[in-house]
Image (cartoon, grey):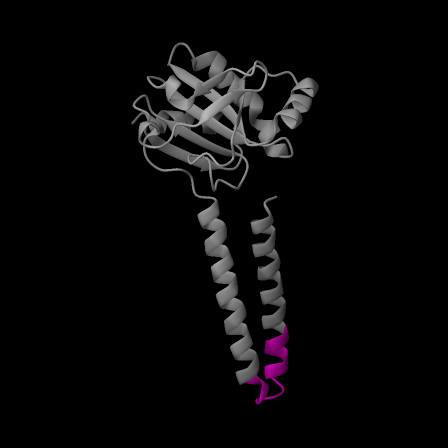
Amino acid sequence: MNDLIIFGMGLAACMILFVLISWILMRRRTALRMIFGGISGVFGFLFALASAFVIYQGKPPEGVIGTVDSPILVSVDSGEEVKLDDFSGKTIVVNVWATWCAPCIEEFPHFERIQEEHGDADKIEVVIVSTEDQKTLEEFHHKFDFELKSYRVDPSASMFKGIQPRPVTLIFNAAGELVESHFGSLNYEKLLNLINLSSL
């Protein structure tokens, strides 16, 4: 889990505990109300600030592939370099994942099924992307059979910079426009529905 999310959850738990203790004490001593009220306000502000930052860090990229620096994707298996806009003309399903992310691994079969059943017929290209290093990804690939096109991307690439949660699915239409984004895991039905919505 992302460190920022853990921080936000921890801050929320501390705030809830503090408010509970404050409520108990304020029922007994009026003099403490202003003090604990002020401290509660500070905690509330910090929590809101942390929450906003977490949300900002997790927002998907915006715009069209061609209007931003199209990231260089390096094939984990072959080392071949391609750009995301090389797939323009198709519906591009980009899944941002990580080797430590269990939900990411669980949803791979659904992405494989989409590629197998709809790739050629519906001009869909499924691309799974990780910002992890080559060695980590190679070791993972040796343990699992991969049917999908798996790529490594520089985490500083503008299109993926700031995407913190895993997994994240981004769908670009044939014109290269980002039309759908989803945070969290997907099954086959939800993924297919998301792709169909992107074509409306």
Q: Position of residue 6 (x, y in %)?
A: 61, 51
Question: Where is 4 relative to 89, above or below?
Answer: below
Would residue 110 appear left or right of 89 to someone viewing this image? right
Q: Nearer the viewer, residue 195 or 165?
A: 165
Q: Quadrant of residue 137?
A: top right
Question: Where is 167 relative to 75, above or below?
Answer: below
Q: Is residue 29 magenta?
A: yes
Would residue 96 appear left or right of 29 to someone viewing this image? left
Residue depicted at x 32% and y 35%: 63
Residue depicted at x 49% and y 12%: 116
Residue depicted at x 51% and y 57%: 50
Chief secondary structure of the magenta span? helix
Q: Nearer the viewer, residue 4 or 126?
A: 4
Q: Nearer the viewer, residue 24 or 5?
A: 5
Q: Is residue 63 magenta?
A: no
Question: Where is 200 relative to 86, above or below?
Answer: below
Please state the extent of the stretch shown in magenta in the rendering: 21-33
Residue depicted at x 59% and y 15%: 77
Would residue 72 appear left or right of 11 to someone viewing this image? left
